[in-house]
Amino acid sequence: MNRPAWRYLFGLYRDDKFAIALSVAAAIGQSLALVPIAALVRRALDESIPQGRTGELLLMGALMLALYMGNAGLNLFSRNKVYWINKHAVERLRQELIKKYYAFSRTQLYDIDRSLLHTVLVEEANRIDQMVSSLLANFLPAFFVSLFLGGMLIYLNWQLFVTLVLVVPGLVFLIRRLGRRLRGHVRAFHRSFEVFIRGVRFFLRTIDLTQTQAAVAYETRRQFDNLSDLREKGYRFLWMTSVYRTSQDLLVTSAGVLVLFMGGWGVISGWISMGEVISFYVTLALLTRYLSSFLGAITDIVVGNESLTTLYDLLKIEPAPPYRGADISVFQGRIRFEGVSFAYSREHPIFVDCNLDIPAGMITSISGPNGSGKTTLINLILGFYRPDSGALYADGLPYETLDVAALRRQIGVVPQNPLLFSATVSENIAYGFVSVDEAELEEAALSATALDFVRELPQGFETLVGEDALFLSGGQRQRLAIARALLIKPRFLILDEPTNHLDVPAVDLLMENLRALPYKPTILLISHDPEVVKHADHKFMLRDREIFRVEAQELLERTDRSTNR
C-alpha cells in the first residue's frame, strides 16, 4: 500500500471530519440496534413460546421489527453522508488533476502520454471514487457492526464462538495469498486499458489517413490486437475477483455449517438450549451479511489502491514552467529576441544566437522554408519554451520577471490549422469569455471578414458548425479563428499562414481591416506568401538557424531558392 498516496487521499477529506465522524457514529448505532435482537430471539424460543405468552411474543416481534427499521434508517443516513462526502472529495481530486495538467510545461506534456492523462482523470479517478465509497459505506460500518456482533456471539455462547475462530486463519491466508494475485491482475488490466484508450484515440484521429494510405487492414489488425489483450486481461481480472469472493463466501459458509453441527450436538448433549442455538445462528447470519460486505469491500480497495498509486505518481510530478515571474503590466506590443539559441535536442538546434525586434503597433512578417523554426518562434513568444541561451523581452522587460500567463491574455493567435469545436459560431468565437454581447461578436467577425458569411448561415451566429467545423469551408474556419483572436482586442496578434484558405482579394481586405483596428495591435505574419508579406512594415527571413532582415524582392528570391531546393 502506498502510504503517501493514502495520506494525500485522506487530506482531501480534512474538511469533512465531522461528517465522517457522524457517519461512523451512525454505523455504531446500527450495531447497537442489532445487539438486542439475539437476546429477544432466545427469550422467545426458551420462554415465551413454551409458556404460551402470546402478548409477550407479539411485543418482542414488534420490538425486533422496530430495531431492524432503526438499523435500516441509520444505514441510509450513514450512506447518504458518505456519498455526499465522497463525491465532493472526488470532485476536488479531479480539480487538482485539471490544475496540474494546465501547470505542466509543454515539454512535460509531450513526455507524458496523453492517453494516460485521460485515463487518470476519467477511469482511475472513478475507481478511487468507487473504492472510497466502498470503504466508507461498506468497509467501516461492516467493521464496527462485525465487532459488536462478534462480542454478542461470545456473550451468547463462547464455545460456539471458538468454533468460528477455527476459520479465521484460513480467511487471513486467503486474503493475503489471493489478494496478492488479484493486485497483479488489476495492474495488468489497468495497463491494458490504457493501451486500448491510446489506440482508440489514435484510431478516431487518423481515420482519413488510414483510408488514404490504404492501411485499413493494418490498423484494424492493430486495434483488434489491443482488444484481444484487453479481453484477456479483463477476463483474468474478473475471474480472479470471482475466485477471491467465492472463496471468502465458502469459508464464511463453512463457519456456519460448523456452528450448526456443534450447536445441534450441544442440544443433543444437553449443554445448550435450542433457543441459544437459534439466537446464536440468527446473530451469526447478521454477522455473515456484514462480513460479506466487509470482505467484498476489500476487493474494491485492492482495485482502487492501484488506481490511487497511478494517480499519485502523476500528481507527484512537479510542474516545471519555463518562467516563474509574477510581474503583470499593460503590454504595449513590442517583443525582442536577444542572442536567443534554442534546440529540442542538442543534435538539431533550431536557433543559434538570434536577434529579432518586433516593434509595437506595426506589421512584421517572418518567412522561411518548412522546418526552419517558424512554429518554434511562436512558442517562444508565447512562453511555452525557454531559450537555451539568450533572452526574450516584452516592452523591454525580461520574460523571467513577467507573469507569462497574463502576457498571453494580451496576445491573439491564429494557428495554421485552427481548432474549432462542435458548438455554435458564437460559442467558437467567444471561447474563454463568460459572456459576450452580439455587438462585440459582430465587430470581431467584421474585422475578420467573417460577418457576411455568418449572416448567411441558417441560424447566423447560433448555427452549429459540427465536429471540427465539418460544415464550414477552410476559409470560413480561418475567418472564425481570426474573429476569436480579435475578440480579446489583443496587443499582439500572431497570424500563422493566414492565406492557407483565402484568395488574394480576401487577404488584401483582411489586412486592410487589421491595419484599421483602433487599438493598433502589433501583427506578426508567419508566411511565405508574397501577397501577405507585401503588407508588412518589417520583413524577416528564417533560414539556417538564423533570422535575417530582408527587403521584399530579396525575400521573394530567397523563398524561391528555398522552394527549389
Image: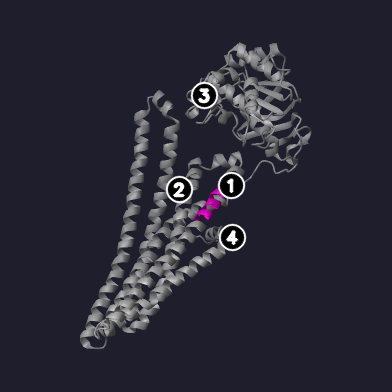
The answer for how far apart the CA atoms under marks 2 and 4 are is 25 Å
Front tag of 3 and 4: 3
Point out the frontmost of discs 3 and 2.
3
Q: Position of residue 510 (x, y in %)?
A: 64, 17
- Badge 2: how crowded within 10 Å, few (<14), some, or many (20+)? some
Q: Which residue is mark 4?
A: 15
Frontmost residue, 429 versus 98: 429
Res 123 label: 2
SS state under label 3: loop
Which residue is rendered at x = 31% and y = 71% of the image?
Answer: 285
- Any part of residue 372 in sight: no
How far apart, in angstroms, are the residues tagged by discs 3 and 4? 48 Å
x, y percentage for residue 176?
Answer: 39, 66
Which kind of residue does numbered mark 3 sit on? Gln
Above or below 321: residue 478:
above
Single out the mark in the foreground, 3 or 1: 3
Q: In this image, 546 relative to 91: left or right?
A: right
CB under 8 Å between discs 3 and 4: no
Please state the horizontal and vertical placement of residue 190, each as a whole percent of the image.
42, 49
Task: Give the mark nearer the N terminus: 1 vs 2.
Answer: 1
User: What secondary structure do most residues of the magenta stretch adopt?
Assistant: helix
Residue for badge 1: 100
